[in-house]
Amino acid sequence: MKRFIYEVTEAFRIAFSQIRANKLRSALTALGVIIGIVAVTLMGTAILGIDAGVERSLAGFGDDVVYVTKWPWRRIDDWWTFRNRRDIDVNNIHAINDWIATHPEGSLKVAVPNVAWNATVIRGEYRIGNMVIFGTSADLARIVRSDMKEGRFFTEIESRSARNVVVIGFDVADALFPSESALGQTIRIRSQQYTVVGVAARQGSFLGMFSWDSVVIMPIDAFARSFPIRWANPEIRVQVDVARMEEAKDELRGLMRRVRGLSPEKKEDFELNTQQVIREQIDPIKSKIALGGLFITGLALFVGAIGIMNITYVSVKERTKEIGTRKALGARRRTILLQFLIEAVSICVLGGLGGLATAWALSGVAGALMPAFPLVFSLGLVLLGLGVSVCTGIFSGFAPAWQASKLDPVVALRYE
């Protein structure tokens, strides 16, 4: 064991002395590995960023919320079948909430109505077009995944009395009130004036997915004064026990069939959607991105490995007499193999460290240029980069090292 430790230590000493003696050659050799590790790390950073961005956007939907809608969120073929369905009646929330009140042990927690319309929001000389206006109840505050930056959500009394109060998203507040607080201020939507009682904290958007930053939320009865509820994409959001999701969906399905008067032989004329439907559509896209990235980074690393292998072969040829001398003095084949293998791995690891540093710097630049894209540079990526560097060094250095270890000392000493 002591002999092996000595051989490894000596191999590292020889490897770094050779790297120092041939700085330019070693740097150019490591360049292929640097490019490969940069590609691996940036691809991993992008994939982790996509995951983080999707999770952040999906948080707005809530993993414990079931959406009762007219249309499914998945891809459909028979468009007319869904087009001819009855609209969702948001007044059905009363029947659902009555059921929840009388069945506290059930998997359903609370139901809230939701309608939406796009409109222009005006405050003095400032205006924002095409903003999403939500009409809902005060119970929405129980199920949304968004904190308040300022103020509060509207109350049950304000909701039932249809007061003209609103909660606005961060970007709406920033655009309409750039240098002052929005709380207590008045905004105009169509012919109605609304008082701002709350501003949601910044959530951020990703790939065009839903964000609370660009919405205006008001009581549904106040919404009805300016917009037609029937044409406002009505839906019902039901918070459920996420640990009993399938049970909750079955319970809600039966309840909706009853309140909509569907006999057992009739098909359902509504849809139960969850964020899992969105995940199932996004996951294949993420897989294709990862597969394409794996091919590109694998190609870059393969080119780098070929460069390392070529230079290691050159190094073996240059030091053939040295190998013959060492073997004549009693060096084992294992010792020679370790010497050249560790030299190849050392170059790859140094290249890997350079690649990681470059990738970290590029991630910082990309993050500054694209603040909406959540780049994630994690410890796992650092360990992955170093692991890939070591594996590349072993792959590219083993064949030349094996050839060096098999040299006949007599032939090697006579090599010119």
Image (spheres, helix red, strand yellow):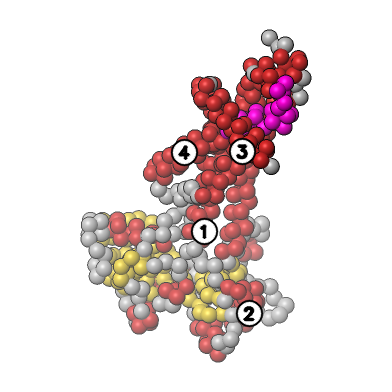
N-terminal of the pair, mark 1 or mark 2, is: 1
N-terminal of the pair, mark 4 or mark 2, is: 2
Residue with the mark numbered 1: 55
Quote the CA–CA distance across marks 4 and 2.
Answer: 54 Å
> Label 2 is placed on what type of residue?
Glu
Quote the CA–CA distance across marks 2 and 3.
Answer: 55 Å
* x and y percentages locating residue 280 in the rendered image: 62, 58
Residue with the mark numbered 4: 357
Residue with the mark numbered 2: 251
Q: Is residue 224 above or below residue 4?
A: below
Residue with the mark numbered 3: 390
Tell me if residue 208 can be seen: no
Between 362 and 270, which is closer to the camera in this rendering?
A: 362
Quadrant housing residue 130: bottom left
Q: Is residue 302 above or below residue 233?
A: above
Residue located at (59% from left, 67% from top): 273
Q: Quadrant of the N terminus?
A: top right
Quadrant housing residue 39: top right
